[in-house]
Amino acid sequence: MLCEICIDALHDRKGWVSSDQDESEPTILLAHHESIASLEASALEACEICHPFWSQIDEDERSRLRDFGTQWAKRQGTGAKLRANGEKLETFDGLVTICAIINLGAEDGMKAAGMDILLSISLESDFRDECPLRKKDVTGAYIVQKGTGENLGKKTSFLSNTTASEESWAKATTWIETCCSNHQACNAEAAAEAWYPTRLLDLSAPDLDFDTLRLIVTSDEALECKQRYTTLSHCWGSAQFVQLKKSTYGQFRKRIQLSDLPKTFREAVEVTRRLGIRYLWIDSLCILQDRDDLSDWLVEAALMHKVYSHSYCNIAAAGSQDSSKGLFFKRDSRLSLTADVTICAEGLGIGEDYVHCTIIDLEFWSHAIGQCPLNKRGWVLQERLLSPRVLYFGRDQLYWECRDHAAAECYPEGLPETLRNGVPAKFKRLNLAVPSSDADPEETVDPFAYLRIWNSIVRSYSDTHLTKASDKLIALSGIAKDFQTKINDTYVVGMWHSTLESSLLWHVSRQSQIDGSPSVRPELYRAPTFSWASIDGRINTTGLNKENLLIEVVDLHLDHVSEDTTGLVTGGYLDLKCQPGSFQMMVNYIGELQQLFLKVGGTIVKSKHKKDWDNGVLVHLDVGQRSFDNENTAGSLYYVPSQEQTTADDPLSYLLLVAVDETQTTFRRIGIAVTAEAEEIGLLSTVDKEVRTIRIV
């Protein structure tokens, strides 16, 4: 369903601002809500456009928005302009804008998928700049498709007003039974030799009553062959709850009262029992949590990949910010209704003035699952990727994800392919299952397919939160171990040796973390500076091009805390054969906006055709820095060309380093610079420079 404001905008063009009749990409710009109160009211009415958009904003952020002002005047006719000659889109002075875009290009598959119009929604630029949101790039994207939506998967409505209903449970059991019966990839571990975590929670011990469970040590138990267990993924949050410690170990081995556990744990026990499973694994109850002795935690962390990959099903508390909130929630059944509307399509190039269309949230899965409170936790990424099955308990419905299938209560037969995007979908399609014994020995895995997915995983992982920043490497080690078994490569603190040179060219997006705060390189050592794992920030990775490289790793050394080479390190370096060149970093400010320029041989590296206010080479610092006067005076800054340009307009990346010793042979990384301008590339050429080997720590 749609709210009246959306219907008025789409059907009557109410709030029309401007149109662009470009044949390849005609656009209509429309005003939307006048106030936050209006937007929130439409979201609460389950509007298919407004609800997903509003749901992206955390509750504490919503409070700040409300306090910022419930009314933001809509002022039309202020000279708004649409995109022209590559210029930046400028919008009117209102709150929210809708921009409906027809995509006539067949290259991106929109037409083949039945998508006729792409509709986007965002906060208006002036409001966005002034509002107190930490994450200001809140957007929505929707498919506006002619007809009833069958091509993309029309929603199946649900009737119950709670996710604890029999209606919800019936769909969950259907997903699980179908997966266990028909999905070979999801059952590979079940067919292999049985493996169990060190400890499990026994939910059905014959000598205990229904309201009691017990911690068992699996090596001491005569577990029946192929006995199964579930796992729980949950947000720890700030809520206090009982944990396994040396002081509670003895009692846990005897009995644990169900009433002593937080709501999420109790309901995970309920779900496990309903599935007919006797054992459950919960991190805080199965791993010793004593802060003064991490020995057990380090051992168990190294086994985490097996804990999840051998589980029967991972129970994911997707809608809870801490363990006190539980798995089940009341819900609005109107959210499952498909939104149909007749829109005014005049000027959009589809041959009709008014068309009956279906509105479908293009980011349905990304918002409901990818951005839910649970999946913002860094540790949960490997729990999600490695588990053969995940049953998500969201705030509005249940969701399903396995190696073969993704579904939701409103899409019970399977999520439309167009709506399923993100790392897990790509990752699980690579078939994480252990190869069967009768597999063709000549059949090989494409390592580059895995390495491309690895880059996507790094980007997604950097967009999550870790309570302990020191967990950066170990919270990803389970996935790294799984990759090692597939690609036969050496893991290098978040990267892979076979593509190490190109992997060094990562950069931090906008020098920021996921919450909008500045990126940092923690004082407590975590990784060498050449690794993205040394940074708390949003990471962008590069391609895997190994051709025409001007850098070569000739030696590598890492000091691992244990024999686990995917885990913690206390030191390390790599020796790089390259052609470094000296530069100075010039800093300019336009108000609070910082501009950085590379100065080589007394010349600012910037193409002559650029305007005075334009940047030269694009500089991505790992961590923000206001001044480089000390480094410039010491002559300690160096850039390193990474590869030759083979095609005009191909961007080239340059490592930016600072010397840390007087001989200027040992360096720390501070960022990268990027340019595709031939003139700037010429100014940065080091072909006449000496090829030498430097060390990066």
Image (tube, rainbow, N blue to C red):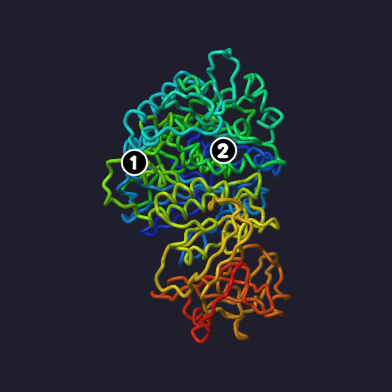
Report the mark closest to the observer, 1 or 2: 2
Q: How many marks?
A: 2
Task: Say which of 672 and 30 sits in front.
Answer: 672
- For the question of whether residue 75 can be seen, the reply is no
User: Relative to the observer, which residue lies in front, 332 or 477?
Assistant: 477
Q: Earlier in the sequence, mark 1 or mark 2?
A: 1
As measured in the structure, the alpha-carbon distance from the residue carrying label 1 to the one carrying label 2 is 35 Å
Point 48% across, 30% down: residue:
335
Q: Which residue is under mark 2?
A: 374
Q: Which residue is mark 1?
A: 146
The quadrant in which the C terminus is found is bottom right
Q: Is residue 635 visible?
A: yes
Q: Position of residue 130 (x, y in %)?
A: 67, 52
Q: Are marks 1 and 2 in contact (CB under 8 Å)?
A: no
* Dot 1 alpha-carbon crowd within 10 angstroms: few under 14, some 14 to 19, many 20 or more: many
Q: Quadrant of residue 41?
A: top right
Q: Residue at x 51, y 75 (%)?
A: 577
Look at the numbered disc 2 and give the secondary structure of its residue: helix
The type of residue carrying mark 2 is Leu
Compared with 397, 74 (above or below) is: below
**Considering depth in this image, is 441 or 589 the residue closer to the camera?**
441
Q: Regarding mark 1 in the picture, which secondary structure is present there?
A: strand
As drawn, the label of residue 329 is none
Q: Amino acid at mark 1?
A: Lys
